[in-house]
Image: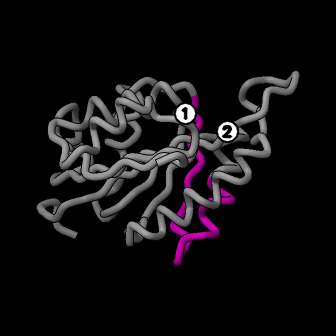
Amino acid sequence: MSVAEPRRIVLFRHAKADWPEISDHERPLADRGRRDAPVAGRQLAATGIAFDLALCSTAARTRETWKLAVHELPERPRTVYEDRIYEASPGELIAVLNETPDDVRDLILIGHNPGVHGLADVLAGEAEGDAQVRMNRRGFPTSAYAVLTYTGSWKALEPGTATLVDYWAPSE
């Protein structure tokens, strides 16, 4: 693919997690999360985006969210579980995205707040419609996602270079 063709980046926050007495990294989804993740998957399928790659945090709640959501997609993308997404800042997430091979057109990153919301804000130099207003009013709740477009090499992705084109949350 040419780096001049638009790419799509979906930033997907994990579904609602439970709070048992275990390490944060191993926290499973709560019942609500298990209900919301497939709903988010159906919404992702409705976007028509055919993901080439999924980058997923290694935390239990993100892995479980992705497992439930991906079954709703028409095709399962190649999935890479990446330790660096867990507790990552927007800058650290950009560094992970910068390593994406240029033959990947559309990708989804399944991660955590505040990093996912911060990344959406940092990348979006522009926004279409009311997507940014809705995203910032809601604060990126669990199971929410933002869709951004970007033109260029993944190595050149940096703050302000993308456009926020869509935002969805379970209560939308």
Give the crowd class for mark 1: few <14, some 14-19, many >=20 residues within 10 Å: many
Residue 42 % position (x, y): 54, 66
- The residue beneath circle 2 is 16
Disc assigned to residue 66 = none
Return the x and y of residue 130 as percentages of the image width and height.
Answer: 24, 44
> Which kind of residue does numbered mark 2 sit on?
Lys
**Few, some or many residues within 10 Å of mark 2 (<14, 14–19, 20+):** many
Q: Would residue 73 be counted in the magenta stretch?
A: yes
Name of the residue lying farthest toward the front: 172
Q: Are marks 1 and 2 in contact (CB under 8 Å)?
A: no
Quadrant of the rendered image containing residue 162: top left
Element class at badge 1: loop
Q: Is residue 37 left or right of residue 166?
A: right
The count of marks equals 2
Magenta-highlighted residues = 66-86
Magenta-span inclusion, residue 13: no
Q: Quadrant of residue 156?
A: top left
Residue drawn at (55%, 53%) of the image: 80
Q: Residue at x 31, y 52 (%)?
A: 166
Q: Nearer the viewer, residue 85 or 100?
A: 85
Q: Is residue 3 left or right of residue 55?
A: left
Residue 117 image position (x, y, % from top left): 41, 32
* Quadrant occupied by the N terminus: bottom left
Residue located beneath label 1 in the image? 112
